[in-house]
Image (tube, rainbow, N blue to C red):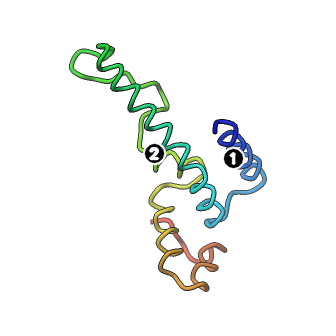
Amino acid sequence: MCGLFFALRMERDENTCREPFTHLEARAMMAMISGFEKEAAKERRKAGIANLKQNKVLAGGVKLTPPGEAGKTRDKVAAQVGYSFGTMERVNRVCRDGVPELIEAMDAEEIPTAG
């Protein structure tokens, strides 16, 4: 699975070097990346529990989290495609509830999605 995840990251980087993702492209890439990030989050939680059991916790109960690993998975995935989670939530809502014309206008950035 690691090879597929790295291939997705390479595709993302290659595409965003030329121009940013459209809203729908970002949504599709998020869907592909999120499964890998959720799995990584599970591993981090397991490691945190193991550290707790081995007393690898600072006094006062502060966990030793490596830099760059803290935060919500949803925010990390959205950032990887160049958006905030809030913006991607609005994109998802338009895709779920909007008529095709609204979805096309949103993807063409004819209407704002940022809050």
Which residue is situated farthest in the left direction here? 60
Q: Which residue is mark 2?
A: 73
Quadrant of res 7: top right
Q: Earlier in the sequence, mark 2 or mark 1?
A: 1
- Residue drawn 67% across the image and 59% down it: 21
Is 106 situated above or below 12? below
* Lateral position of residue 9 relative to residue 80, left or right: right
> In the image, what residue occupies the spot 23% across and 15% down?
59
* Dots 2, 1 in contact, CB < 8 A: no
SS of the residue at dot 2? helix
Image location of residue 104, percent across then percent down: 64, 79
Residue in front for this viewpoint, 38 or 82: 38
The percent coordinates of residue 102 (x first, y second) are: 57, 83
From the image, which quarter does the C terminus lie in? bottom left
Q: Is residue 99 left or right of residue 21?
A: left
Q: What is the C-alpha distance between the residues marked 2 and 1? A: 17 Å
Number of numbered discs visible in the structure rendering: 2
Image location (x, y in percent) of residue 87: 49, 62
Which residue is painted at 56% across and 43% down in the image?
36
Q: Is residue 84 left or right of residue 81?
A: left
Q: Which of these two is toward me, 37 or 79?
A: 37
Q: Is residue 71 left or right of residue 103?
A: left
- Depth check, front residue: 37 or 80: 37
Farthest front residue in view: 1
Q: Amino acid at mark 1?
A: Leu
Type of amino acid at the residue the image marks with label 2: Thr
Q: Is residue 23 above or below residue 35?
A: below
Using a 10 Å C-alpha cutoff, classify the residue at mark 2 as few (fewer than 14 neighbours), some (14 to 19) or many (20 or more). some
Q: Where is mark 1, residue-wise?
A: 8
